[in-house]
Amino acid sequence: QVQLVESGGGLVQAGDSLRLSCAASGRTFSSYAMGWFRQAPGKERDIVAAISSSGAIIYYAGSVKGRCTISRDNAKKTVSLHMNSLTPEDTAVYYCAATQTPHSGRYYSKPDDYAYWGQGTQVTVPS
């Protein structure tokens, strides 16, 4: 099992940058594919970015592609999401998620693919 704790959310201005971090517990973090999701009020939980367990394969949702970077440090058991050029449409609760996988080069983009979730961190970009 793995436990996930997000940090780094808050109130930011449009155009600013933000870095979210997710710290994982457990001894086999390197066998988990990771993802960042977000959920705005009244909307479904959507993928933002995903990264394979090896870190070699990365996926970005179209809405953030070009202004978002996901990275992981398997030695430190962390995964990060850096976002720039934030807009009010980025306002949401951001969740870190993990799924154990034997495929080191595969990412997962659907919420149902993930077994473990953090508690979420609120990001607010006022209009």
Image (tube, helix red, strand yellow):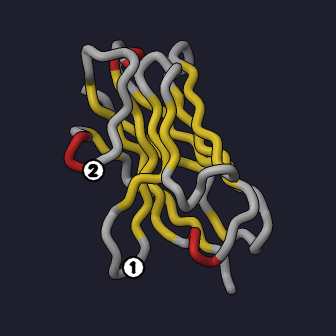
- In the image, is 72 to the left or to the right of 33? right
Q: Residue at 31% x, 69% y: name it.
A: 44
As drawn, 75 above or below 82: above
How far, Cα to Cα, is label 2 from label 1? 17 Å
Binning the other alpha carbons within 10 Å of mark 1 as few (below 14), some (14 to 19) or many (20 upward) gives: few
Residue 21 lies in what quarter of the image?
top right
Which residue corresponds to the image point at 72% horizontal and 69% vertical from the top-left? Answer: 12
Q: Which residue is mark 1?
A: 41
Q: Position of residue 73 (x, y in %)?
A: 57, 21
Q: Judge by depth and name the residue closer to the eye, 69 or 18.
A: 69
Element under disc 2? helix
Q: Which quarter shows the N terminus?
A: top left
Q: Residue 40, how many percent across, how many down?
A: 43, 73
Q: Nearer the viewer, residue 59 or 94?
A: 59
Quadrant showing the C terminus:
bottom right
For discs 2 and 1, the disc positioned in front in the rendered view: 2
| Residue 76 in picture, x, y percent from top left | 56, 19
Is 3 or 126 nearer to us in this picture? 126
> Could you classify mark 2 by the number of other residues whose Cα lies within 10 Å: few (under 14), some (14-19), or many (20 or more)?
some
Q: Is residue 96 above or below residue 124?
A: above
Measured as percent of width and height from the top left, residue 71 is found at: 59, 31
Check disc 1 and give the amino acid type. Pro
Q: Which one is earlier in the sequence, the residue at label 2 or at label 1?
A: 1
